Amino acid sequence: MTVHEVSRMSGVTIRTLRYYDRIGLLRPAARTEAGYRLYDEAALMRLLRILLLKELEIPLKDVKRLLQLSDAEQREAIGLQIKALELKKERTEKLIALARRLEKGEGTMDFSAFDRSKEEAYAAEAKARWGNTAAYREYESRPKQPGTEDRLMAIFADFGALKDGDPAFDAAQTKVQALQSFISANYYTCTDKILFGLGQMYAADERFRENIDAAGGEGTAAFVKAAIEAYCGKA
């Protein structure tokens, strides 16, 4: 297909398609003798993915990096981004409901609509995997020590040994501090705000919950969440 045909079909301007070519994001499959760009099915599928990633609010500067990952890594990163958007939608719906109550003159002391911690944690997790962000650069700059994931799972196993107790007690709180320090030392700076969001994610996301429960036994992810909430003063 010619660049004009692709533009008509996709709604992407010719100027944008030329820009994508110039930055190496979307190369044409071939060129005519006169130098006109031609696109094949593989190029169109790549364009489709580019447009989808942009709609998922992934910055263009990060799209190219994401497309260089394996299919499995792309699916994982996209899944995290989708979850962040779902949480954003949920928070927006809460804001609308709150605005409607205030519009009707109904008193309320519910501040939950302003809590961005969960969606920020998902976004941080996704961007730490592929984004051109400070967190990603920090993650990339850290030397990758063998056995890091195993040591992280060992911390969750320690939580599992405590899960029948009170998550606010010293033993659990000490373990939360150890978890925060481990993440900061091996992945990216884990502030209390990020830590709180991670706790929510550990319990809510099936992938994280299953891995953590596998390390510490059923209910460990929920216990970690509760312990982190107590640690951050948001129980």
Image (cartoon, rainbow, N blue to C red):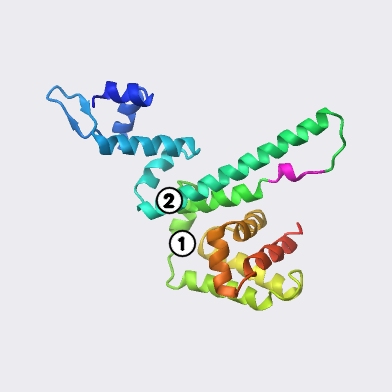
Task: Give the farthest residue toward the left.
Answer: 33
Identify the residue at horizontal 68%, vertical 37% (top origin): 93
Q: Is residue 186 above or below residue 63?
A: below
Identify the residue at horizontal 36%, vertical 22% (top origin): 13
Check disc 1: other Cα within 10 Å, few if <14, some if 14-19, many if 20+.
few
- Residue 193 falls left or right of residue 128: right
Give the spatial CA distance, label 1 vs label 2.
24 Å
> Which residues fall within the magenta stretch?
110-115
The image quadrant that residue 199 belongs to is bottom right
- Residue 106 falls left or right of residue 30: right
Amino acid type at mark 1 = Arg
Nearer to me, 70 or 90? 90
Q: Which mark is residue 142?
A: 1
Foreground mark, 1 or 2? 2
From the image, tell me which residue sits under label 2.
75
* Res. 196 visible in picture: yes
Q: Which mark is residue 71?
A: none
- Residue 138 falls left or right of residue 97: left
